Image: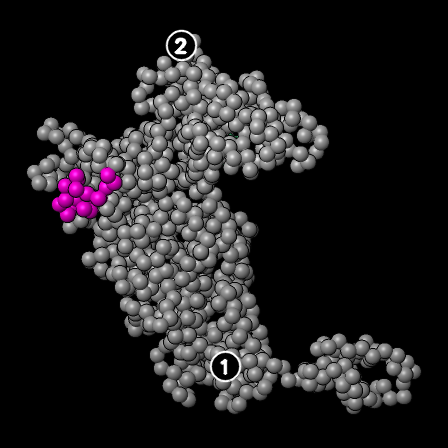
């Protein structure tokens, strides 16, 4: 087979690597380690997409070249295999999701192997593997159990536990509640996003423009018992941890915005209707503690029952508060509504309950609201301000109530204009706006949200905004009517799904003698994990929120522990669960005693390079950082962050620059590309298309181009006219010329540095230049050709192995694989160009070429040009009117007779 034929070489080398376990990673790394992770695929029924091999080839190049540089490399692969499509398919066809998932995984595995990625396949895992599910459930128990539970499990009574004395002093019931509030997994009845079409509840993150991210179905709000994870308790650390990471700035910014830390003040406004309020004993928004309160280990300071607490980022505008707003769900709605307003308020509250937060805020074209009939007193000037109910205030943010400053807040400005509420400027913009605009602001005819100098603010007049904020916060605290406060946009993570194909929760609900839930829950003991999914004949959701597992057989659904009957939790975990920690399991995939051995974890973590799509900028990357930090706090892992360097690959688009999709008919099947051009050509092409982070359109001509390049590489080394594989006669043991050495070492330098910068397209361009140069050489020294084959090997490993084997056969033995051959090292001494060849023009035409020392000055170059015999002849007896040297490029002479 003298011609380049990937179809015969590629399967042969894949079988070799498999059989010899060439890419098996050591259990413990040597001196230098590199953990390189790909975002593992969801094994969909469509098989691999050409987008997958883009990131996978990039990481493979890094790994292969690192091994050749003596680094211990961990490069694993697995499958994110729970999820909706398998279940939807099961509902349609009756085929069990597990068997369908297994089929899809074997297709993916075959396809990945056909691309020659250097994975350690012995570490392969799927999130659906029962032993893996066991540890996902175990991690859930770490989230649910507090250190307190751990002590109790060791048999210590609650009264003896290390909880603060203040808590103890309030009695055992209070202590239990206090402990429950410290669980990172808890149940909640909060309104959730119920999607009737998908038959499930969705997380906020899974909703785009008010519709389900998957399928674009409408989403309704409904109260439902759900499992939540208290990610808000980690908001600060999730935000601050980003500073240390080598991640794209855009991704960091997205995460910071998602967490949305804001600092301001809480202010208590005294209510003018305290008699009515005595009826509501515990009713204030802050009685449902906000995340911030829980974080500060102490007790949320409850506002006096006769005051309304607001959160503001602009306490400096207190003198401009002309009304207040409470959310329609605010616990004081009933108490504050006067009888004559009761009907209107009831109607308004009902309407608001049907809208999502997004409809109420971002999407709302018009502000709407209703007056309660009640007033509160502004603590700074004792002014009475009317209290309204409006749905642009959300119950889930801050305290669920605001002081409205229409002169300086756009939403309040719109609202005040609509309901004829006074607008009073308290910040003078000065020259931050035009003189006309300033006049409008001061007259309350234009909103000014910026900074300036206080006006209409009593003793604070003339204070700059930033100073005013500080001063008034101190003043509020001193007078016991306010304090500094921090809030987050981040909400707790809705962690349960009403689906079959997910991890069951290791949670049991206690039943009484009549089979009714007592409301008490307990965890499944660790030694009884995993809780496997039961057999189910019917997967269909029933359009009601009860999960399909409610139809499980009784022997699964109703276990008994110590003669106490229980019902299992029938919600399942979301698909995010499995992908939150897979990178840890790869380190120690068969461990039966722990998710990962601590010594092994310490040796390999953190992940040094993580490559995947930008669509995971927030969700997966935030969730797994959260789990990782919890595991760090529990002593399971040794690093505070899991992924040190992150790179997002760009999208591969259809040839027409549109997104590839089945419906557009522009998708490319990697199997077909491999069949026609080979895996090496596919890999090389995807790296040559452009910079890794860029989006770029597919082109079959481009694939053909790199395929032809590989053909030229083949002919550079081998005699393509022979019947057998024979090294080309031009490839000899001759000593390289200085110019050949220069080309080789320049190539080694560029390719090495480009790989380190993940700039693969430029590395390939350098290798193409190398091949163009050496294809023209009559003598191709092995000392140049062999290192080149090593440089090419991370990109196109199959052809490189084949050429390496062939090149070695006649001289020394290149037995086995090149995977651990030392990576070529460049020598600075060879990089210097000793001499340059310059064309010499006379009268605008190139008449001769001269070779001069690379560092020759212009005078020396001119002298050499004029001394060249042909040139000397041409200029003899003529007048030189112009002599020009373009250093390194050419010499130009103009003559006159
Ligand atoms: C008075 C004020 C005056 C405000 C002003 C802004 C400008 P961020 O930065 O997002 O934290 N707010 C507070 N709680 C709210 C809720 N539950 N629903 C809707 N809006 C709420 O925004 C905080 C600001 O958003 C707060 O500061 C409050 O309006 C409003 F010139 O208070 B501000």
Residue 683 is labelled as none
Determine the image quadrant of residue 848.
bottom right
> Residue 129, can we see it?
no
Instruction: Please say if 325 is above or below 695.
Output: above
Q: Secondary structure at mark 2?
A: helix
Q: Position of residue 746 (x, y in %)?
A: 56, 77
Q: Residue at 74% x, 82% y: name it.
A: 857
- Viewer-proximal residue, 599 or 96? 599
> Residue 891, can we see it?
yes
Determine the image quadrant of residue 78.
bottom left
Direction right: furthest residue: 897
Total number of numbered labels? 2
Q: Position of residue 261 (x, y in %)?
A: 45, 41
Residue 785 is labelled as 1
- Viewer-proximal residue, 641 or 733? 641
Q: Residue at 40% x, 48% y: name it.
A: 238
Q: Secondary structure at mark 1?
A: helix
Query: Alpha-carbon neighbours of circle 2 within 10 Å: few (<14), some, or many (≥20)?
Result: few
Does the magenta-highlighted stretch encompass residue 660? no
Along the polypeptide, which appears first: circle 2 or circle 1? Answer: 2
Instruction: Please say if 724 is above or below 146.
Output: below
In the rendered image, the quadrant that contains the C terminus is: bottom right
Determine the image quadrant of residue 11.
bottom left
Q: Position of residue 26 (x, y in %)?
A: 30, 69
Q: Which residues are magenta?
A: 148-165
Direction top: furthest residue: 340
Does the magenta-highlighted stretch encompass residue 154? yes
Q: Nearer the viewer, mark 2 or mark 1?
A: 2
Instruction: Please say if 755 is above or below 244.
Output: below
Residue that carries the numbered disc 2 in the rendered image: 339
Instruction: Please say if 737 is above or below 599.
Output: below
Q: Does the residue tagged 2 have its C-beta within 8 Å of any atom of ligand 1? A: no
């Amino acid at each position: 087979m003298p011609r380049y034929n990937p179809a015969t070489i590629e399967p042969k080398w894949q079988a070799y690597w498999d059989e010899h376990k060439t890419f098996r990673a050591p259990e413990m790394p040597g001196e230098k380690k590199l953990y390189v992770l790909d975002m593992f695929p969801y094994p969909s029924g469509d098989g691999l997409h050409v987008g997958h091999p883009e990131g996978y080839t990039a990481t493979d190049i890094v790994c292969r070249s690192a091994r050749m540089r003596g680094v211990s490399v961990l490069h694993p692969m697995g499958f994110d295999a729970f999820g909706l499509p398998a279940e939807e398919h099961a509902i349609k066809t009756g085929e069990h999701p597990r068997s369908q998932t297994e089929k899809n995984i074997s297709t993916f595995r075959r396809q990945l192997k056909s691309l020659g990625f250097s994975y350690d396949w012995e570490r392969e895992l799927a999130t659906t593997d029962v032993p893996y599910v066991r540890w996902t459930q175990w991690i859930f128990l770490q989230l649910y159990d507090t250190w307190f539970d751990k002590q109790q499990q060791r048999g210590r009574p609650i009264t003896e536990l290390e909880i603060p004395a203040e808590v103890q002093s309030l009695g055992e019931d209070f202590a239990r509640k206090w402990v429950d509030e410290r669980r990172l997994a808890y149940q909640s009845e909060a309104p959730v996003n119920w999607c009737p079409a998908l038959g499930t509840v969705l997380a906020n993150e899974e909703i785009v423009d008010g519709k389900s991210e998957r399928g674009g179905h409408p989403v309704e709000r409904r109260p439902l018992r759900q499992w939540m994870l208290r990610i808000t308790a980690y908001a600060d650390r999730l935000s601050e941890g980003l500073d240390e990471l080598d991640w794209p700035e855009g991704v960091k910014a997205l995460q910071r915005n998602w967490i949305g830390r804001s600092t301001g003040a809480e202010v208590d406004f005294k209510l003018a209707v305290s008699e009515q309020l005595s009826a509501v004993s515990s009713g204030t928004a802050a009685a449902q503690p906000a995340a911030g309160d829980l974080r500060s280990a102490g007790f949320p300071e409850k506002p006096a029952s006769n005051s309304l607490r607001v959160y503001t980022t602009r306490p400096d505008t207190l003198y401009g508060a002309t009304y207040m707003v409470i959310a329609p769900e605010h616990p004081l709605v009933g108490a504050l509504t006067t009888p004559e307003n009761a009907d209107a308020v009831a109607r308004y509250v009902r309407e608001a309950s049907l809208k999502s937060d997004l409809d109420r805020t971002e999407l709302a074209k018009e502000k709407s609201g209703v007056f309660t009939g009640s007033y509160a007193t502004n603590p700074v000037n004792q002014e009475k301000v009317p209290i309204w109910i409006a749905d642009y205030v959300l119950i889930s943010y801050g305290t669920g109530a605001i002081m409205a400053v229409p002169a300086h807040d756009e939403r309040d400005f719109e609202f005040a204009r609509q309901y004829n509420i006074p607008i009073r400027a308290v910040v003078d913009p000065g020259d931050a706006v035009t003189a006309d605009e300033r006049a409008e602001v001061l007259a309350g005819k234009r909103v000014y949200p910026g900074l300036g100098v206080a006006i209409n603010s009593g003793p604070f007049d003339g204070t700059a905004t930033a100073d005013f904020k500080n001063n008034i916060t101190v003043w509020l605290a001193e007078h016991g009517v306010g304090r500094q406060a921090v809030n987050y946009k981040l909400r707790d993570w809705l962690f349960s799904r009403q689906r079959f194909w997910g991890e069951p929760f290791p949670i049991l609900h206690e039943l009484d003698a009549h089979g009714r839930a007592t409301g008490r829950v307990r965890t499944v003991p660790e030694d009884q994990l995993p809780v496997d999914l039961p057999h189910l004949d019917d997967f269909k959701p029933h359009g009601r929120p009860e999960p399909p597992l409610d139809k499980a057989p009784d022997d699964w659904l109703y276990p008994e522990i110590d003669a106490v009957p229980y019902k299992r939790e029938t919600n399942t975990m979301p698909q995010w669960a499995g992908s939150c920690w897979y990178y840890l399991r790869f380190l120690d995939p068969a461990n039966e005693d722990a998710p990962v051995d601590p010594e092994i974890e310490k040796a390999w973590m953190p992940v040094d390079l993580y490559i995947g799509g930008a669509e995971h900028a927030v969700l997966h990357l935030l969730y797994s950082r959260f789990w990782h930090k919890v595991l760090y706090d529990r002593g399971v892992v040794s690093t505070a962050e899991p992924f040190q360097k992150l790179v997002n690959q760009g999208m591969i688009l259809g040839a027409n620059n549109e997104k590839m999709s089945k419906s557009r008919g522009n998708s490319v099947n990697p199997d077909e590309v491999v069949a026609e051009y080979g895996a090496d050509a596919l890999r090389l092409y995807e790296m040559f298309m452009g910079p890794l982070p860029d989006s770029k359109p597919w082109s079959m001509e481009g694939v053909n181009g790199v395929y032809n390049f590989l053909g030229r590489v083949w002919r550079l080394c081998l005699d393509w006219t022979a019947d057998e594989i024979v090294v080309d006669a031009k490839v000899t043991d001759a000593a390289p010329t200085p110019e050949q050495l220069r080309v080789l070492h320049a190539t080694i330098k560029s390719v090495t540095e480009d790989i380190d910068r993940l700039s693969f397209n430029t590395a390939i361009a350098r290798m193409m230049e190398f091949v163009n140069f050496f294809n023209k050489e009559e003598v191709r020294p092995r000392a140049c050709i062999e290192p080149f084959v090593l440089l090419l090997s991370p990109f196109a490993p199959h052809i490189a192995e084949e050429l390496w084997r062939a090149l070695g056969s006649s001289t020394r033995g290149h037995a086995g694989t090149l995977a651990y051959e030392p990576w070529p090292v460049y020598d600075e001494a060879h990089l210097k160009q000793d001499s340059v060849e310059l064309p010499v023009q006379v009268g605008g035409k190139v008449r001769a070429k001269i070779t001069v020392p690379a560092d020759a000055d212009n005078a020396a170059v001119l002298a050499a040009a004029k001394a060249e015999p042909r040139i000397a002849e041409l200029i003899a007896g003529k007048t030189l009117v112009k002599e020009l040297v373009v250093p390194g490029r050419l010499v130009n002479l103009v003559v006159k007779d």
